Image: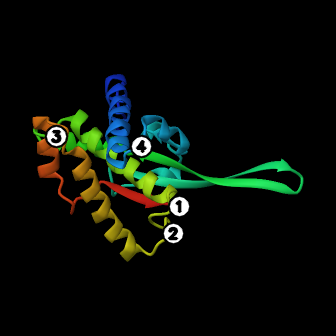
Amino acid sequence: MRDRFFNPSQMSLAKAAFDHAEQLVANYYRFGRRAFQAYRYDIRTLAELETHEIQDGAFAHLCRYRYEKKRFPDVSRSFHFYRVCLQDNRILDAVERANSFIKFAPLMLYIAAHELVHVIRFDEGLFDFEAPQEEKIREEEIVHSITRQIMQPVVHHDLGLVLDCFSSQYQIGDLYN
């Protein structure tokens, strides 16, 4: 698939989708929106990704990095950092193939909420990032279910189409070390 990138308008819509998804996910998990500041993650689009962050099988995937910070010669502190790697070309292709039934903004909202649920579940230790593939498949089903619950308060015709067209069998995200 040839490289296609979000245009400035789509980049703005993607950012807005993640902002909205943060609100929805925070409401679902019943924590304040500021609580997201405790989660170390960023969002990158295809134009910004490293080669190993580009995947053909999903709209987005999550990479986990380990950072170690030396405080003193004998003391170090490490933490995980997550990167949501948006695959612009796959998202744009899906919107085009849906012949205007699937709109960019609601699809991005679903993708954003889905990936944020992963970040929380990994960071809180609710699922092991290093789990075997069979367990990751089950985890995807759980995350799809949670994402659908999160989307319930959003009343928007185009989002309903996204939920109908992209069932839990469709691969929204992927995990990568």
Q: Residue at x 45, y 46 (%)?
A: 84
Coordinates of residue 101 in the picture (x, y in percent): 10, 39
The correct choice, above or below, for 149 with respect to 4 in the image is below
- Frontmost of labels 2 and 1 is 2
Tell which residue pokes out farthest to the right in this image.
Answer: 73
> Mark 1 falls on what kind of element?
loop
Q: Which residue is mark 2?
A: 130
Please tell me how crowded label 4 is: few (under 14), some (14-19), or many (20+) other residues with Cα within 10 Å: few
How far apart are the two marked residues, 3 and 2, measured between alpha carbons?
Answer: 32 Å
Q: Which of the pair 153/113 is nearer the observer?
A: 153
Q: Residue at x 27, y 51 (%)?
A: 147
Q: Which mark is residue 31?
A: 4
Q: Which mark is residue 177?
A: 1
How far apart are the two marked residues, 4 and 2, measured between alpha carbons?
Answer: 27 Å
Residues at badges 3 and 2 in contact (C-beta under 8 Å)? no
Q: Which mark is residue 159?
A: 3
Please tell me how crowded label 3 is: few (under 14), some (14-19), or many (20+) other residues with Cα within 10 Å: many
Coordinates of residue 100 in the picture (x, y in percent): 11, 35
Q: Which of the pair 73/13 is nearer the observer?
A: 73
The correct choice, above or below, for 26 with respect to 133 in the image is above
Coordinates of residue 17 in the picture (x, y in percent): 32, 34
Q: How is the image coloured?
A: rainbow
- Frontmost of labels 4 and 3 is 4
Label 4 vs 2, first from the N-terminus: 4
Residue 1 visible in the snapshot: no
Residue 175 visible in the snapshot: yes
How far apart are the two marked residues, 1 and 3, measured between alpha carbons?
Answer: 30 Å
